[in-house]
Amino acid sequence: EPEVTQTPSHQVTQMGQEVILRCVPISNHLYFYWYRQILGQKVEFLVSFYNNEISEKSEIFDDQFSVERPDGSNFTLKIRSTKLEDSAMYFCASSALAVSSYEQYFGPGTRLTVT
Amino acid sequence: DAKTTQPPSMDCAEGRAANLPCNHSTISGNEYVYWYRQIHSQGPQYIIHGLKNNETNEMASLIITEDRKSSTLILPHATLRDTAVYYCIVRVLPMDSNYQLIWGAGTKLIIKP
């Protein structure tokens, strides 16, 4: 069964450094998402991406964040200058283009630790 | 904010049916009810969704009341691997654009041997 993959599984970085989290969505999916979950808290939407542009973003997704689909398979989340409060699990998701269903399929997540 | 209310936790004996309730009293006519679950620290997993008819798939059944103000997710024969946080989410089914999922706190379901 096709699945969303994410790398790395765990990333440790120092405050102020840039990080890039990578995702490979399911191959025939056209909608891509990033969510985050701070330890012990709710899952929070960050951004959705379709047709090579951002279609929705939350207040969390400020100028420090960016997304890119650099080729036909990868979808990346970049945090330009990490802060301690960016420490969280980051989940990538994708969904297919279909009138009847827009289930989002999630990857296993990247645990980002900012020190 | 999430438009659903769920009990924070529930227990169920292994092999029994687990019935997880969800209130969505402000649901509008074009909003679907989705259920996801998250096994400890893993990515959320889609379970099932419905509009007004009851739905069943290989994982679960979804019962939606006639007034659509509440629903119940049923895991017919719960196993220890079903221990997870279960999220009930209402959302519009997008036609021309995609919509974020808005997550509440969910119900922590513990399956006991």
Image: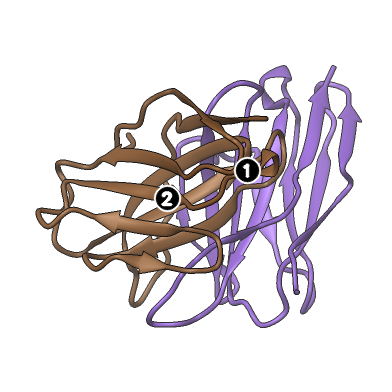
Task: Give the mark nearer the N terminus: 2 vs 1.
Answer: 2
Q: Position of residue A42 (x, y in %)?
A: 52, 30
Residue depicted at 73% across the width and 25% down the height: A87
Q: Nearer the viewer, residue B78 or A101?
A: B78
Quadrant of the rendering where the N terminus of chain B is positioned? top left
Compared to residue B23, the image places residue B64 above or below, namely below
Density class for disc 2 (Cα within 10 Å; few <14, some 14-19, many ≥20) is some
Q: Which chain is purple?
A: A
Quadrant of the rendering where the C terminus of chain B is positioned? top right
Density class for disc 1 (Cα within 10 Å; few <14, some 14-19, many ≥20) is some
The kind of secondary structure element at disc 1 is helix
Residue depicted at 36% across the width and 67% down the height: B55
Q: Position of residue B47 (x, y in %)?
A: 52, 58
The kind of secondary structure element at disc 2 is strand
Q: Which mark is residue B74?
A: 2
Q: Amino acid at mark 2?
A: Ile
Colour of chain B in the rendered structure image: brown
CB under 8 Å between callouts 2 and 1?
A: no
Do the residues at pointers 2 and 1 share their chain? yes
Compared to residue B18, the image places residue A40 above or below, namely above
* Chain bearing mark 2: B
Residue depicted at 88% across the width and 35% down the height: A11
Residue B6 found in image quarter: top left
Determine if residue B3 is in view. Answer: no
Residue A40 found in image quarter: top right
Q: Position of residue A32 (x, y in %)?
A: 60, 64
**Position of B96 compared to A45: left or right?**
left
Q: Which mark is residue B82?
A: 1
Q: Amino acid at mark 1?
A: Asp
**Position of A80 compared to B108: left or right?**
right
